[in-house]
Amino acid sequence: MALSTTQPDTTRKRARPNRRTGWPSVALALIRTGPALMLVAVIVAASVLSPVFFTTRNLGNVLSQTAVIAVLAIAQLLVIVTRGIDLSVGSNLALCAVAGALVFNSVESGPLVIAVMLATGAAVGFVNGAVLVWGRLPHPFIMTLAMLSIARGLALWLSGGQPISGMPQAVQQIGGGSIGWLPYSAFLVTGLALVTLVLTRAIVWGRWIFAVGGNPEGARRAAIPVKRVVISVYVLSGLAAGVGGVINAGRLNGGSPTFGELAELDAIAAVVIGGASFHGGRGHVGNALVGALMIGVIRNAMNLLNVNAFLQPIVIGAVIVLAVEIDVLRERLEDRLRIIQAAHS
């Protein structure tokens, strides 16, 4: 009788994939899209509370009113990524608008007025960066806080403390013109955001600013020109104040020393809401725009709901505190999820 010669199964059993392995990546993605999700929630709430909110006319108003904050937030993001802060952008904006109005009263040239406003903003930004770097100040808070007062004082002195009416047609179109319900300023903001995205993601300078913010000492050892990088972001912040001045002056057809009051806080709040860290080395242009839109939507919704004007700054202040707290929690969650992700990989 033949013996059975059944061969043992030597094939290895394939390990079943752990379905839970990818959940940290999903959770990280949700955390990173958190600002956009919060914006959607705010828009939905505003639409439910006010039927006027989601009309094209009102959406155009939101985009127009948010344009200045968005421009300042884009540049403020670059500063914060390098562990800095620019408290002077609001006062710088006012100085740029006043300078442009004074030039227009003497020479009715649109290109010249715009060039003067942009140059004024960039010059103030250069002074901020140069004194910070070469003066070896301990923190940019000191220099930009001083410039906040200096620029506002110059705007008051040059204007005699009074608004100066009149702006070229080109400036009025940029600040107040529109195609249908879409304001020109929204296209300007989109263009600046795309340029900034290219600068931060596609060229060496963009990698440098993240390196300087993430590890300044390591950046120096890697032969990155830290001083020039820091000065450059403050120049760009000042240039953004000049662009904001053009938009504001165009909307209101003039320059005033009171323009941009507390605009620096709105810009900083927008950047923080967008997930950038005061510790530097982290931030995204798209999220900064989301933060600016959120502030604009909240303000617009409060106006539509007839919220007391004296209460509105309280609400915005509470949003800033909440945003910072969320940023702290988000950073802790990201650190824990990265540890879990590394353990599962």
Image (cartoon, rainbow, N blue to C red):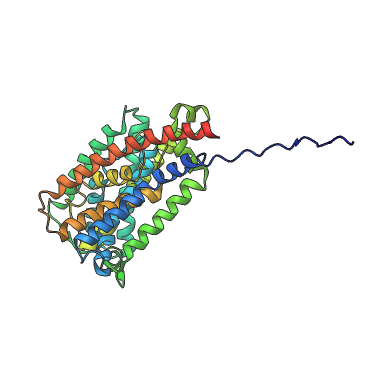
Q: Is residue 103 visible?
A: no
Q: Position of residue 31 (x, y in %)?
A: 39, 43
Above or below: residue 328 compared with residue 35: above
Q: Is residue 147 visible?
A: yes
Of all residues, the one furthest to the right in this rendering is 1
| Residue at 24% in and 66% down | 58
**From the image, which quarter does the C terminus lie in?**
top right
Residue closer to the observer: 198 or 234: 198
Q: Position of residue 301 (x, y in %)?
A: 20, 57
Q: Which quadrant would residue 123 be assigned to in this image?
A: top left
**From the image, which quarter does the N terminus lie in?**
top right
Count how many numbered circles sit on residues in the image.
0
Q: Position of residue 128 (x, y in %)?
A: 32, 38
Q: Which quadrant would residue 57 be assigned to in this image?
A: bottom left
Above or below: residue 149 compared with residue 185: above
Residue closer to the observer: 32 or 189: 32
User: Is residue 67 shown left or right of residue 165?
Assistant: right
Residue closer to the observer: 74 or 315: 315
Of all residues, the one furthest to the front in this rendering is 1
| Residue at 31% in and 53% down | 39
Q: Which quadrant would residue 299 be assigned to in this image?
A: bottom left
Q: Position of residue 302 (x, y in %)?
A: 17, 56
| Residue at 53% in and 30% down | 222
| Residue at 43% in and 50% down | 196
